[in-house]
Image (cartoon, rainbow, N blue to C red):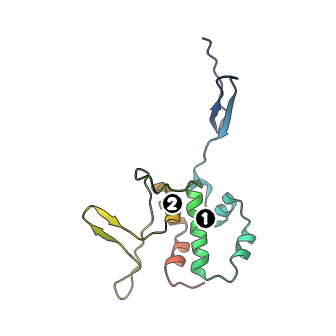
Amino acid sequence: METITIEIPEGYEIENFDKTTGRVSFKEKPKDIKKMIKNFSDVLKYHGIDDNDFHHANEGLEGDEIAYRKIKLIVSAYNLKEVPDYNNSNQRKYEPRFYIPSSSGAGFSYDDYDDWVTYSGVGSRLCFLDYDNMIDATIKFLDVYEEFITTKSN
């Protein structure tokens, strides 16, 4: 058996090797999404959406509705467009939690614990597949989350 060495181009990885033809195909390595996304314009760019188109599509909506649309896009980008598999209990899913103090002592929160089961109300589209990505997105887009979950106005 003869062995040859193929140099993989910088920034690429092997996508497929056809044993019959010997053809090797490459794909671009996934980039670190935390470095790619610095602001919401980067999120739109990741999804191929023009800033002006997004703005016009959301004209007339309440601030929390726009924030919800933004968060769906943010989470999708940070998940690299992978949709969480809710039938897979081995796949970890993360959602940010917020502490919002108020004069009454009760802020926006919901959490219920019973023995070893935790119940939490969270939109399934809003779950991150990576803890570090969740932290990065939450810090960078805290204002969007605040707009979504509080009565803050535009």
Q: Residue furthest front?
A: 87
Can you say which quadrant of the picture contains the C terminus?
Answer: bottom right
**Of the numbered discs in the image, which one, if any, rests on residue 127?**
none
Q: Residue at x 60, y 81 (%)?
A: 63
Q: Which residue is mark 2?
A: 136
Position of residue 136 relative to residue 91, above or below, is: below
Q: Going from the N terminus, do you reach mark 1 or mark 2 first?
A: 1
Q: Residue at x 67, y 35 (%)?
A: 26
Where, by quadrant of the figure, is residue 108 drawn? bottom left
> Are dots 1 and 2 in contact, CB under 8 Å?
no
In the image, what residue type sits under mark 1? Leu
Q: Secondary structure at mark 2?
A: helix
Q: Position of residue 25 (x, y in %)?
A: 68, 33
Mark 1 nearby-residue class (10 Å; few <14, some 14–19, many ≥20): many
The residue singled out by tag 1 in the image is 73
Q: For the residues marked 1 and 2, what is the alpha-carbon distance in whole angstroms?
A: 15 Å
Disc 1 secondary structure class: helix
